[in-house]
Amino acid sequence: IKKIDWEIKQAEFAYCIGSELEGKGLTSFAVKKMLNFAFEDLGLKIIQIIAHKTNLGSVKVAKNNGFIWQRTLQNEFTPTDGAPLDMELYELYNEK
């Protein structure tokens, strides 16, 4: 959980997993557990996931947990050895 904005009760999830463990549902499971913590214990209302469109695993994690695509963020991320990349913003709202 990063970039917590306590005023609007919003945060971003960031995660990674080793290639040997990809495709086993572990990240989706961890995100589900962290959503419960973020909403119930921290009282957050909006959780974001920002992923590149080619990162199909990350997009799948977002969708598996009910996140909805919102928009493309232009030049959101600049890798250390490359040009700025557009990223996709997914959000999930705590309806309670």
Image (cartoon, rainbow, N blue to C red):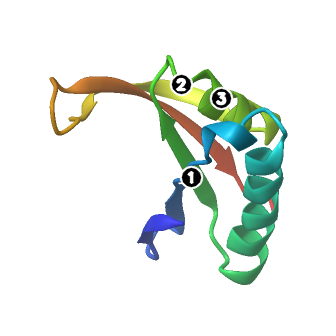
Residue 70 position, x and y percent, is 54, 29
Disc 3 crowd rating (10 Å Cα; few below 14, some 14-19, many 20+) is: some
Q: Amino acid at mark 1?
A: Tyr
Residue type for callout 3: Gly
Label 1 vs label 2: CA separation? 12 Å
Q: Residue at x 65, y 29 (%)?
A: 57
Q: CA distance from mark 3 to mark 2?
A: 6 Å
SS under mark 2: loop
Q: Residue at x 73, y 55 (%)?
A: 31
Decide: is 37 above or below 41.
above
Residue sitting at x 15%, y 23%? 83
- In the displayed structure, 62 sits above or below 14; it is above
| Amino acid type, mark 2 | Asn
Q: Which residue is mark 2?
A: 55
Q: Which residue is mark 1?
A: 15
Relative horizontal placement of residue 45, taking residue 66 as reference (left or right): left
Say whether disc 3 or disc 1 marks the residue closer to the N-terminus.
1
| Residue 95, x across and y down, in percent | 78, 56
Give the camera-side residue of 20 and 23.
Answer: 20
Callout 3–callout 2 Cβ contact below 8 Å? yes
Q: Secondary structure at mark 3?
A: helix
Quadrant holding the C terminus = bottom right
Q: Where residue 58 sits: x, y (%)?
A: 61, 34
* Front residue (pair 69, 14): 14
For residue 74, side relative to residue 41 (left or right)? left
Please state which of residues 9 and 79 is positioned toward the viewer in this rendering.
Answer: 79
